[in-house]
Amino acid sequence: MAPTLFHYPLVPMDDFLKHERKERCKLLVGAGVVAILVIVALALGVLLIIYVKRANSEACQEGHRAVMECRNVTHFLQEELTRAQDGFRDAEAQVATYNETVMTLMASLDKEKAHSLDAEKKVEELEGEITTLNQKLQDASMEVERLRRKNQDLSARIADQKDSASSLKDTSSAAAPLLPILLLGLGARLL
């Protein structure tokens, strides 16, 4: 077989130059885009390097440590605040309980005061009754003493008149039992 020759159609020179210009333009635009991309990549790389340097700088590290310390302190303070609020709620509950207890005790105290005043009035009434009864007892004792003297006088008269008639003896023996009856009557009258 015979060698095959590639046959290219003949292209006019104007078309070739136009085509070459288009290719050059494309090449220049592509090279410009690549150059811009390289410049942008280099700028981004430089900016990244600057950022990394600043991020790893001592001042930035100290700032990061300070932020972490602030977070720790804030967390600790929040826990303390929560504990304090819980303690405050517990204290409020205890205060409410204590107030109820105080109110109950005050009501009981008022009742006891009223009861004590009633008891004092009753004691005063009883003391008045005792004074009255003591006076009556004293009066009754004086009456008993008077009657005893009278009985002694009667007994002395009876002894003097022993010689008298037997009728007088019956009268004196009848007067002796009258004394206890009189005393019982006076005692009943006092009560």
Image (spheres, grey):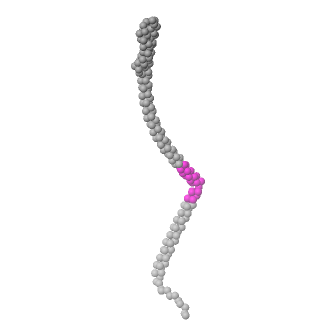
Visible residue check, residue 51? yes
Q: Nearer the viewer, residue 20 or 164?
A: 164
Residue name at image x 55 percent, y 59 percent: 51
Q: Quadrant of residue 49?
A: bottom right
Q: Residue at the far left: name it.
A: 189
In the foreground, 121 or 74: 121
| Magenta stretch bounds | 50-76
Look at the image and say whether residue 72 sits in the magenta stretch: yes
Q: Residue at x 59, y 55 (%)?
A: 57
Q: Is residue 168 above or below residue 67?
A: above
101 drawn magenta: no
Q: Quadrant of residue 141?
A: top left
Looking at the picture, how far across and down is residue 36, in whole percent? 51, 67
**In this image, 54 relative to 11: left or right?**
right
Q: Taken as a whole, is the magenta stretch helix, strand or loop?
A: helix
Q: Is residue 157 above or below residue 58?
A: above
Residue at x-position 53% and y-position 63%: 44
Measured as percent of width and height from the top left, residue 25 is found at: 48, 74
Q: Estimate the x, y position of residue 33 in percent, counting from the top left.
A: 50, 69
- Any part of residue 143 in sight: no
The number of callouts visible is: 0
Residue lying at the far front in this picture: please name it: 166
Q: Position of residue 46 (x, y in %)?
A: 56, 62
**Which image quarter holds the N terminus?**
bottom right
Q: Nearer the viewer, residue 89 or 14?
A: 89
| Of residues 54 and 166, the one drawn nearer to the viewer in this rendering | 166
**Figure check: 173 above or below 70:** above
Residue occupying the point 44% across, 25% down: 123
Give the quadrant of the C terminus. Answer: top left
Residue extending furthest toward the right: 58
